[in-house]
Amino acid sequence: MMGEGTHPKASETERFERRRQDVVHAASALINELGVKGTTFAELARAVGLNATSITYYFDRKDKLVVAVYEATLDWLERAAREAGDLPTPAERVRAFIAAHVALRRRIRGGERGLITALSEIRTLEEAAQAPLLTQYARVVDHVRGFFGEHREGLKRSLDTARAHVLLEAMFWWPVWSLRYSTRDFDRLEARMFDIFARGLAGDGKGWQPRPLESEGWRSPEVSSAETTNAFLRSATVMINQRGYRGASVNRIAAALNVTKGSFYHHHNAKDDLVFECFQRSYDRLSAVQLAAEDIEADGWTQIASALAELIDLQFRDPMPLLRTTALQALPLDERGSVVVRSNRLANRFAGMLADGIADGSVRPVDPLVASQLIMPALNAAYEARGWAARQPDPEIAVKLYAWTLCAGVFSDPPEVG
């Protein structure tokens, strides 16, 4: 009799949990497409075939839903990293971690529900909600850092932290650029990504010897007045990178500059206009660095390394970093399209530089298009490693440790590490 009485409750619980997961998965897709701000209960209800009121049966507040979406992503990431970490060699671990992301994307393209959600807006949550998520992400980083060996201290640990950061960011970017390929190409793409992470980009006999570039305006100018356009762009870029679009309110941007909201709207019609301008300025600066590197009388790899060194150092130390691409979710679709087109053009320029390096023998024979899609997230996310960079012995060492994954791969240490 007791068993008969428990079956309906168990069945009801299972049905509730299935439906709840449907809501989480649909919210994940919407957040990736529209950002947290653009994901509403009305949009979500349409995606899962419910009405907006029914959504509140599973999540009474939007912030709870957002936390659940991030938890689902972090659970998957931690499981994938832990399973890869159980394999016997660093090469097997890295290959398995890449394979897990490729396999997930293949299943999703085949119709499976569930997504890896961009984690960029975790810091826009209330501190009590974000703290456990950031703690879990730190565990993911620990697992990935462990791919490269145990009990590594000092510069070796710093190097492994940089490797974990670059590898994770590449996997976060993979869902975006994988859309350009058929799933029939996924096995080849997986092999090409692993090859680049395993052996880097530099050709035989080539190391890390970037040349200084003569700045033609990509470094931040001295700002004499808080109300200049540069001051607004700098404040907005830093705040969006730190807090996400939602957390970078007009009030906060104005307060950081000690000006009024009225002063903000004197310079910009709306926050979206400022974000779009931040993207344009970031891409102008990145393009200027690429073109300056191409003007060096040197082989292809030296040109690429020089651009990487300048851009990574800019991300580590310049008062105005490059804007994170995660802010794209907040832009209107018409403006977002033009920003994506320009980002792809910059990636294609790196691909062209790589092709030139392959032709002159200074770059290993790699797939330039794949390699460019590993370079872009590494540069984009270098801002997140500012605290890590500040703890290194000097700026040049910080840049070299960070860039070493792209230069020589994740299985060899630079001479400085010992």
Image (cartoon, rainbow, N blue to C red):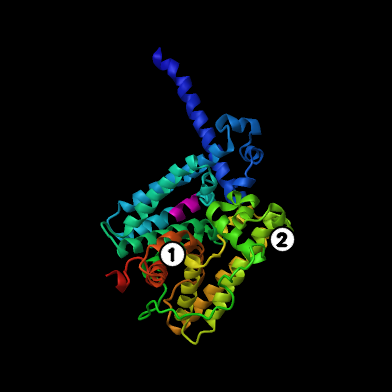
Callout 2: few (<14), some (14-19), or many (20+) C-alpha neighbours within 10 Å?
some
What is the secondary structure assignment of the residue under circle 1?
A: helix
Seen from the viewer's position, the closer of residues 349 and 184 is 349
Q: Which residue is mark 1?
A: 193
Q: Position of residue 287 (x, y in %)?
A: 58, 73
Seen from the viewer's position, the closer of residues 381 and 168 is 381
Residue type at numbered disc 2: His
Q: Are marks 2 and 1 in contact (CB under 8 Å)?
A: no
Instruction: Work out which residue is located at the far top of the displayed protein and give it.
Output: 1
Seen from the viewer's position, the closer of residues 263 and 379 is 263
Q: Which residues are magenta?
A: 101-107
Q: In this figure, what is the number of numbered marks?
A: 2
In the rendered structure, does residue 102 fall within the stretch colored magenta? yes
Q: Which mark is residue 281?
A: none
Q: Position of residue 69 (x, y in %)?
A: 51, 42
Check the picture and name the quadrant holding the N terminus: top left
Q: Which mark is residue 267?
A: 2
Q: Earlier in the sequence, mark 2 or mark 1?
A: 1
Q: Position of residue 139 (x, y in %)?
A: 37, 48
Seen from the viewer's position, the closer of residues 364 and 390 is 390
Quarter of image, res 167: bottom left
Residue type at numbered disc 1: Met
**Alpha carbons under labels 2 and 1: distance apart:** 44 Å
Residue 216 seen anywhere in this rendered image of the structure: yes
Residue 270, above or below 295: above
Check the picture and name the quadrant holding the C terminus: bottom left
Callout 1: few (<14), some (14-19), or many (20+) C-alpha neighbours within 10 Å?
many
Drawn side of residue 51 relative to residue 201, left or right: right
Residue 51 seen anywhere in this rendered image of the structure: no
Residue at x 62%, y 40% (from the top left corner): 44
